[in-house]
Image (spheres, rainbow, N blue to C red):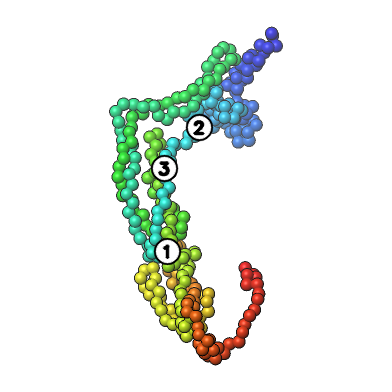
Amino acid sequence: QEQRNQGPVMCYLLFFFLWRSGSCFVLSDEEKRKQYDAYGEEGLKDGHQSSHGDIFSHFFGDFGFMFGGNPRQQDRNIPRGSDIIVDLEVTLEEVYSGNFVEVVRNKPVARQAPGKRKCNCRQEMRTTQLGPGRFQMTQEVVCDECPNVKLVNEERTLEVEIEPGVRDGMEYPFIGEGEPHVDGEPGDLRFRIKVLKHPVFERRGDDLYTNVTISLVEALTGFEMDITHLDGHKVHVARDKITKPGAKLWKKGEGLPNFDNNNIKGSLIITFDVEFPKEQLTSEQREGLKQLLKQGSVQKVYNGLQGY
């Protein structure tokens, strides 16, 4: 029985020793030891030394508030509403030239209402002294009292600038336009760019790809044509040589503007497809073609995918 009662007594003595003197902790800390040597114990008490609560924090870590520390000194994150991500569909024409898009949003806004409400609720530790050297710690929810609020929908018009060369998946943030939080700050609204498919052009980075189908006669004799670009200007294409199926033609500077530097543009890459006649040739036409082309038989079998 006597040995069992020594625990509370030792706890009380330790508490008394720590409360009356922090010199053992001062001597173990190099900077505090310098302050102690320069100002003495009175100098430490006058502001060169932390409070006794800090001594307990030094010894017990985060449990220093048990012995006089203030739990509200601990950092608390400000509550924040949820972010909203909205896909914003844009055309390839808008990516090429840029545009301003107006979006109408119904946003819940907090407005003052009659009455009071509990707010800023948090968990706090309460310490109760049961007797000499005996303490009990309990955790309880503590709330503040705030004016009551209600959420009211308000219509707002937001203007989103579609910058030339904007990339698929990029986001345009609107700070504070997300979901509200009655006890904190609203979240953000982010528009995520989604570039729609185009019937003529395919985007790869800053380059544009398209296919042009020509006839067999055009492939053999040459041709001229214009391709209407995304902003309406014409890209002239002229060939006076034989154009093979799958041949590619690069038009530098006819691609999309670079997002970081609009003065730099990618290339337009044109792939040619050759459409063959649907009618069968007569024997005379076949002989005539052989005499005209003077091309012998070329029947070569090889690995066409080698190296890819």
N-term-proximal mark, 2 vs 3: 2
At x 57% / y 30%, what residue is drawn? 62
Q: Is residue 266 in view?
A: no
Look at label 2 and name its amino acid. Answer: Gln
The reply to whether residue 220 is in sight is yes
* Label 2: which secondary element: loop
> In percent of the image, x 42 and y 26: which residue is there?
143
Whole-Å distance between the Cαs marked 2 and 1? 55 Å
**Residue depth check, mark 1 versus mark 3: number of the one nearer the observer:** 1
Q: Residue, x 65% and y 74% (percent of image)?
A: 302
Which residue is disc 3 drawn over?
Answer: 187
Q: Secondary structure at mark 1?
A: loop
Q: Secondary structure at mark 3?
A: loop
The amino acid sitting under disc 3 is: Gly
Q: Is residue 55 above or below residue 168?
A: above
The residue at the far bottom in this view is 291
In depth, the one of 21 and 305 nearer the eye is: 305
Q: Where residue 74 is drawn, which disc sits there?
A: 2
Percent across and percent down for residue 190 are 42, 49
- Left or right: residue 154 compared with residue 58: left
Q: Which label belongs to residue 59?
A: none
> Quadrant of the rendered structure where residue 148 is?
top left
Residue 217: x %, y % from top left: 47, 83
Q: What residue did someone put label 1 on?
A: 198
Q: Earlier in the sequence, mark 1 or mark 3?
A: 3
Q: In what quadrant of the picture does the C terminus appear? A: bottom right
